[in-house]
Image (cartoon, rainbow, N blue to C red):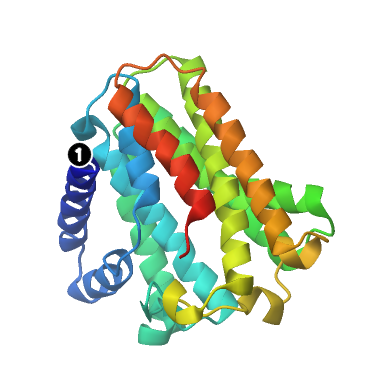
Amino acid sequence: MELLERRRALIEERLIAVVDGVEPEALSEEVRHVALSGGKRVRPTVTVLACETVGGTAEDAVDFGVGIELVHSASLVVDDIIDRSELRRGTTSAWAEYGHGPAIITSDGLLGEAFALFSADPKATQVVAEAMVELGVGEATELSAQPKNEEEYMTLARRKTGALFRAAAELGAIAADSDALTVEALGEYAERVGVAFQIRDDVLDAVADPESLGKPTGHDAALERPSVVQVTDLTPEEANERARAEADRAIDALERVDVANTDARDYLLELAEFVVERER
């Protein structure tokens, strides 16, 4: 775990440096409120670990990891506006703290800083742009054409959550100069982890204690959002089994990768377990 904490510390240090460089000060304060308010840093950790797994270093991948975290943070700002959620990661959401207009500008600022980090590599820019298209389609679907069964829900989960996870791992592979097959295998691993993460998130929203979770629960039901327990006949226990199946397929995809660093690979395996078992 010490090695993993060092990677997270590297990500956090670089994230702080990027946020501190944002101008003007008013935007910097709002970006700081969103980007540095906590979070597990799962996506940037995936980027770094994917890079190391196939022979790169954490330093090679940290900028891309920070970039994908900023994209994720930007999407959360918009999610909270749509959901009218006043709490995020145990603190006030951006719109509740600053108002809707400043929150939207904050989301734009986060995306601008992110793409500045990706701009050094056209492949990285393309990967993230494609992920954002998928994310946008997913968000629009959630609002306008909600899924009515498990198959449609899984498609939405892959777009809404899996796409950014896929991009996170593919960025790590790109940072390590991997071939296309390796990029794809790591991308599939992370996409399936992301889907498992989303399923578990839906279950937690339905059954978890809000204080323990660090955000309000019951939102999916109240807003008629397409939660796995709202649009399917699955019980929370059965939904957790679906999450486990996705995690198992993620592990299968990871086995197609030529591993250069077994410690990093083992952490990716642990992540596939964590997203299924997490309690917040």
Q: Quadrant of residue 247?
A: top right
Give the structural element (helix, strand or loop) at label 1: helix
Nearest the viewer among 159 and 118 is 159
Residue type, label 1: Leu
When the figure is inspected, residue 103 is found, relative to residue 185, above or below; the finding is below
User: Is 220 left or right of 264, judged from the image as shown?
Assistant: right
When the figure is inspected, residue 252 is found, relative to residue 104, above or below; the finding is above
Residue at image position (37%, 17%) is 259
When the figure is inspected, residue 262 is found, relative to residue 268, above or below; the finding is above
User: Is 24 left or right of 115, judged from the image as shown?
Assistant: left
- What percent of the width, then of the height, locates residue 117? 29, 43
Q: Residue furthest front?
A: 237
When the figure is inspected, residue 174 is found, relative to residue 272, above or below; the finding is above
**Where's the C terminus, which quadrant?**
bottom left
Residue at image position (79%, 58%) is 147
**Where's the N terminus, which quadrant?**
top left
- Residue 150, visible in the rendered structure: yes
- Residue 130, visible in the rendered structure: no
Residue at image position (62%, 79%) is 218
User: Is 188 left or right of 101, judged from the image as shown?
Assistant: right
**Mark 1 crowdedness (10 Å alpha carbons): few <14, some 14-19, many ≥20:** few
Residue at image position (31%, 30%) is 264
Q: Quadrant of residue 168?
A: top left
- What percent of the width, then of the height, locates residue 27? 26, 72
Please tell me how many numbered marks the rendered image carries: 1
Q: Quadrant of residue 6?
A: top left
Q: Which residue in the structure is indicated by mark 1?
A: 3
